[in-house]
Image: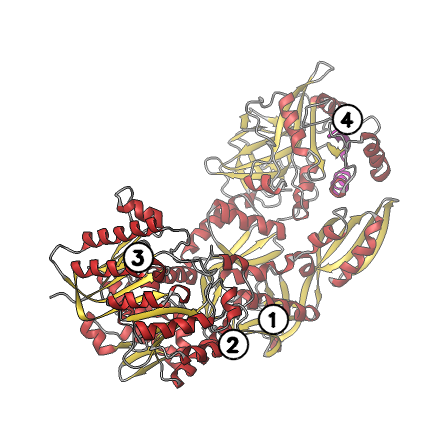
Amino acid sequence: MTDRSKIRNFSIIAHIDHGKSTLADRLLELTETVSQREMRSQLLDNMELEQERGITIKARAVTMYYKAQDGETYEMNLIDTPGHVDFNYEVSRSLAACEGAVLVVDSSQGVEAQTLANTYLALDANLEILPVFNKIDLPAADPQKAKQEVEDIIGLPAIDAPEISAKMGINIPAVLEDIVANVPAPGGDADAPLQALIFDSQYDPYLGVIVYYRIMQGTIRPGMKVRMMATGAEYEVLECGYLEPFGMRKAPELSAGEVGYFTASIKTVKDTQVGDTITEAARPTAEALPGYRPAQPMVFCGIYTEDGSKYPDLRDALEKLQLNDASLTFEPESSVALGFGFRCGFLGMLHMEIIQERLEREFDLDLITTLPSVIYEVDKSDGTTVRVDNPHNYPDPALIAEAREPYAKVSIISPPDYVGNIMPMCQERRGIFKDMQYLDTHLVELHYQMPLNEIIYDFFDALKARTKGYASLDYQISDYRVSDLVKVDMLLNGDQVDALSFIAHREKAYPRARRICEKLKENIPRQMFEVPIQAAIGGKVIARETVKALRKDVLAKCYGGDITRKKKLLEKQKEGKKKMRSLGTVQVPTEAFMAVLRLDEE
Amino acid sequence: MNRPLGVYFHIPFCRSKCAYCDFCSTAQWDDGMMDAYLAALIRQMDDFFIPGGKYPVDTVYLGGGTPSVFGGKRIARLLSALEKRASLTRSAEITVEVNPESADKALFRVLKKAGVNRISMGVQSSDDGQLRAIGRIHDFARAKEAAALCRDYCTDNLSLDLIYGLPGQDMESWLKSVDDICALEPKHISCYALKLEEGTPMYRADPPRADDDLQADMYLACIDRLAQRGYEQYEISNFALPGYRSRHNQKYWDLSEYLGFGCAAHSFYNGKRFSFVADLKEYLSGMEGKNPIVEESDELSYGNRVGEFVMLALRTTDGIDESAFHRRFGRDFEPFAKRLAPYAASGHAVCEGGRWRLTPKGFLVSNVIIGDVLEACDPQEGGMG
């Protein structure tokens, strides 16, 4: 057990590419937590996908020991944070496990969008924020200007903050000294009833779920029966200890103020959700830690394999991913067009994309996905209410008494210059303006009520694009509101393609339907007959395109008896045909589905 | 007695290379190279024809490239070498491809003397602008002249080639080409769609030209026009006055045996399809034993043969007679017929008196139809192989 006054729990926050991961590497090196030889660049992001996208998807933590200039050795717990609006909740829980945050600012860039967004999250969590000015080795570095910006825009004292180069290893000890001196030591009582915050958990095939937590009060030790207060799950702790870059180090016990892990043969991460409070079953704490939100998928889509026979592989893969991801849900569904697949639920679009990419890369599956949807509520005229997360199940308009869609409370923080860009964009997406507040002269916060449906497709990307990346977005589902919703069906040669149906607000239905028709036309090859592409609401066609009949596909010449060439051509044709889905009489390449899905990226 | 063979010689020399051509041919040659090539062809015949065996041959075809560039004398020597090793039937069809610019009186005289009784000439268009655009080095007047010389000094059994879908060609100029060609009174006409193969200069230049719809219309219009003039279509791209179908080409479509000599030449012999390297230098060094010359070799299973037969016979207007099919292969045509039936309904195919064939509209999309029909092949047998 470490003396609590010698513990420092902190995160590193930064705008993307400002050097968060490089600084983390240097801290690990300097504290000899890893040797240079073991050093892999940007150690904390250890998923391949994260490294490519340059974002941290899942939080990780590591315990370092630092001998400070005062001669004392400090236990420094670095807790990493994910960096996307889909994971804001996870970030907030990671920050809640800390007393301080190191804010990395690129000396050549100054304050940028995520600098602000992350700072606000850290301030929300009442953290001590220590600015650090990085990349002073760059010719364009202007730390004085960057410091001035931090003082002016964020209002943090920055003049004496360390000026460093994480890449070149310049002045790194100053960061650690700063943390020792200015991040408060954790409070808490080792003898009080256990109260620990889960900020992450991860499934391991041998150990079961590994739970990452920060102890607020009390002590945890092997043999103790613990209870997750929100889920009610109870387990006996098998092993606990500290987190190291390449694994874990067992310890007899951890107590208030410390960060570590425990295992208890837990089968599913659903039992150990981020934000939940761990307590001792026999001597529970009086109240759970605030801020818990059950993982709740908000965006749904159908996921199918291109090769229908891979359906069981898809199920296995989803089961494996779910072991590690409490917010991923899935249940079987089937589609006339796409065969057997799963309706999957995600936190948001990024989460959805990450899961799709992991399925494709780690499990080598070729996927077809349907348009994402939110959950709609529909009161039918017979008095029953249905929740619809799949357009296919949307009731017949004649049977609908009232339809409602989820709205979210949206908060956008941005420099005032961009308000003129943001407001029309929100309006266009049916946002209802609530208020606007100046946080200081340099920052303004806008509040909207907006249909979730309008947020999930491309709102975040569009917001970034129209504010040069400066605006930050947070949203939370607030309520369901009555809405003029319609279900739009897509028909190919008169046959409905269930996988392409979508639900939209009546005003939005037509432009969207038209674009889908156009996309399909571009992507469906000419067939032996003319193929009408139609979008219809009920029986009424609202948009139409036509794929003209194929007129010419012939190998005119079998030259000099070269039959092989002709055969190869037919083979190639056969291969191409395998990638087609037969929808009624029409052959549709899987790219057509992809193209429709990517509609919003353009 | 064996069934007579077809023999093909590939002559890979041209005076200049056309912008759309991806066949094995070169414009960089000299007499030494041609002599070496002739020697190699003769040596290759020695490998095939057992001395004294006198295998019967009833069609001979010299294609290219431009055989006329090879010169009448070499062609004559080649044919006489063949005659020594094989037994040409009395009525053997002996075709030589020529190009207008290299066809003169002397050549035709020599060819006639060497026994050539059919000439195939690439005219391609009667529009000089279009000819220039595709890199032809003759104009239509030269083609007319060559056709007349052929008739006077060699044979009136003349076949002319045309191409539709050329840059700058519209329906009107296409039909004018068709009419102009007919005026030369050939016995046989081949009409090909321009297809730009990767790696050709024209593929890279990608000049504006008729789209698929217009090409389809050009094709259908040409079939009508030629029918009016008495030319019967007998294969996707081939038309003839009665009695003048190319016997050699028909061997390709009915699974008859043929041997191909020279670089890039294809053979179907003894149940095997094989071809030689499509590179002149590689072929010549290969004939000296320095490298292998067989590029592809494919033994056809029984199922392959059925599949190939269906694929090839559906290219012809004779199509497939259900009972003849049954006699030949000992199996029902019914699974194939089942797949053809919807195309009959849509006007792409017809069945008359148990004989299935594609219509002109069907020929235009024959890749799709044939691909579909062949799915009736038993995959256990390898289908197309």
Q: Amino acid at mark 4?
A: Glu
- What residue do we see at 19% from left, 53% from top? B46
Chain letter of mark 2 equals: B
Residue B173 is marked as 2
The quadrant the N terminus of chain A occupies is: top right
Dots 1, 4 in contact, CB < 8 A: no
Structural distance between the alpha carbons of marks 1 and 2: 48 Å
Depth check, front residue: A467 or B116: B116
Structural distance between the alpha carbons of marks 1 and 4: 57 Å
Specify whether disc 3 shares its chain with disc 1: no
Structural distance between the alpha carbons of marks 2 and 4: 78 Å
Residue B265 is marked as 3
Residue A163 is marked as 4
User: Which residues are the magenta region?
Assistant: A116-136
Specify whether disc 3 shares its chain with disc 2: yes
Of mark 3 and mark 2, the one earlier in the sequence is 2
Is A114 displayed left or right of B308 in the figure? right
